[in-house]
Image (cartoon, helix red, strand yellow):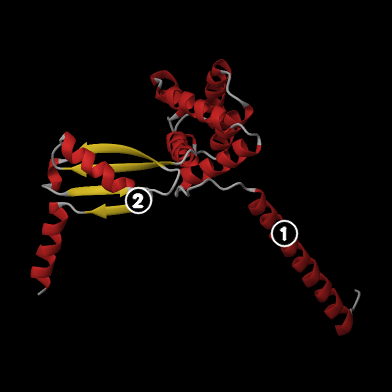
C-alpha cells in the first residue's frame, strides 16, 4: 500500500481542480465562439422550431443561400403535406432511420441543397421531424423580416369595407420604420363581438368588445 502525505494529497487535489477548471474554461470558450459565429436573424422566433430555424438561417447566411433555402423550405412544406410521406414521417411508431430514408429519397428527387438535407437529418436524429412545419414557418417569418416586411394580422367581428381598410392601412403604416413594408392579413371572427385585435411585428393589441366585456365583468365581480 502506498501512503501519500497530506501535502501530496493536496497537490493532487489542486491538479484535479485545475484540470476541471481548464476543462470548464475550454467549454465556455467553445460556447462563446459558437455564439459569436452564429448569424442572428432580424427577429427572434421562440420555441423549439424557432431555434432550429435560427441555426438554419445562420447556415444559409454564411453560404449566401438564404433565398435558395427559402424556396427549398416551401418544397419541404409541400413534401410533408403529401399523404404517403406524411403517414410515415409523422408516425411515432416508425423507426427514425426509416423515416429519414423515405424523407431522404424525397429530398433527393426534389434536388434539395445540403443545407436543407442537413436540417432534416438533424431533426430526424433528435426525433423532431414532427416539428418540420414549425421550423419552416419560423424560417419564413425570419426571411420576411430580412426583406423588411412587417407582418400584421387584424381580426374583426365582421369583414372591413374598403374605406375602413384603407384607413386602417394608413394607421398601421405609422408603426413602420423607414424601409419596412406592411404585409396585412385580415380575418373575421364573430366571437370577438366587435372592435379588433391587432398583431403587428412583436406587438399585440386586443381592442375587442369581448375582452372589454370580460374586463368589465371582472371589475364588477372584484368590487
Left or right relative to 116: residue 172: left
- Image point 34% across, 53% down: which residue? 203
Where is residue 196 shown, x and y percent of the image? 19, 48
For the question of whether residue 160 can be seen, the reply is no
For disc 1, the marked residue is: 29
Expressed as whole percent of the image width and height from the top left, the position of residue 218 reads 13, 66
Q: CA distance from mark 2 to mark 1?
A: 40 Å
Q: Secondary structure at mark 1?
A: helix
Q: Quadrant of residue 97?
A: top right
| Residue 212 vertical placement versus 143 (above, below) | below
| Residue 37 x %, y % | 67, 49
Task: Please tell me whether residue 192 is drawn above or below residue 119 in the rendered image.
Answer: below
Dot 1: few (<14), some (14–19), or many (≥20) neighbours within 10 Å?
Answer: few
Most extreme residue toward the bottom is 6
Mark 1 or mark 2, which is nearer the start of the sequence?
1
Badge 2: residue crowd in 10 Å (few <14, some 14–19, many ≥20): few
In the rendered view, does 36 fall on the left or right side of 209? right
Q: Position of residue 112 (x, y in %)?
A: 58, 23
Q: Quadrant of the C terminus?
A: bottom left
Foreground pick, 60 / 83: 60
Question: Residue 16 appears in which quarter of the rendering?
Answer: bottom right
Residue 222 falls in which quadrant of the image? Answer: bottom left
SS of the residue under disc 2: loop
Residues tagged 2 and 1 counted as in contact (Cβ below 8 A): no
Mark seen at residue 89 = none
Return the residue at label 2.
Answer: 175
Amino acid at each position: 500500500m502506498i501512503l501519500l502525505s497530506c501535502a501530496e494529497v493536496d497537490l493532487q487535489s489542486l491538479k484535479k481542480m485545475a484540470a476541471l477548471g481548464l476543462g470548464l474554461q475550454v467549454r465556455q470558450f467553445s460556447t462563446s465562439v459558437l455564439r459569436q459565429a452564429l448569424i442572428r436573424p432580424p427577429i427572434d422566433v421562440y420555441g423549439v422550431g424557432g431555434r432550429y430555424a435560427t441555426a438554419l438561417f445562420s447556415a444559409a447566411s454564411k453560404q449566401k443561400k438564404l433565398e435558395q433555402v427559402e424556396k427549398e423550405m416551401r418544397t419541404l412544406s409541400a413534401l410533408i403535406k403529401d399523404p404517403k410521406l406524411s403517414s410515415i414521417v409523422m408516425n411515432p411508431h416508425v423507426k427514425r432511420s426509416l423515416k429519414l430514408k423515405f424523407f431522404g429519397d424525397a429530398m433527393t428527387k426534389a434536388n434539395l441543397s445540403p443545407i436543407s438535407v442537413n436540417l432534416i437529418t438533424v431533426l430526424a436524429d433528435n426525433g423532431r421531424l414532427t416539428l418540420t412545419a414549425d421550423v419552416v414557418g419560423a424560417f419564413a417569418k425570419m426571411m420576411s423580416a430580412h426583406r423588411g416586411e412587417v407582418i400584421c394580422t387584424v381580426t374583426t367581428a365582421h369583414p372591413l369595407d374598403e374605406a375602413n381598410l384603407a384607413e386602417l392601412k394608413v394607421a398601421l403604416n405609422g408603426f413602420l420604420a423607414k424601409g419596412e413594408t406592411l404585409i396585412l392579413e385580415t380575418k373575421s371572427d364573430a366571437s370577438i363581438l366587435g372592435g379588433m385585435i391587432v398583431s403587428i411585428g412583436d406587438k399585440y393589441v386586443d381592442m375587442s368588445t369581448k375582452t372589454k366585456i370580460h374586463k368589465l365583468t371582472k371589475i364588477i365581480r372584484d368590487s
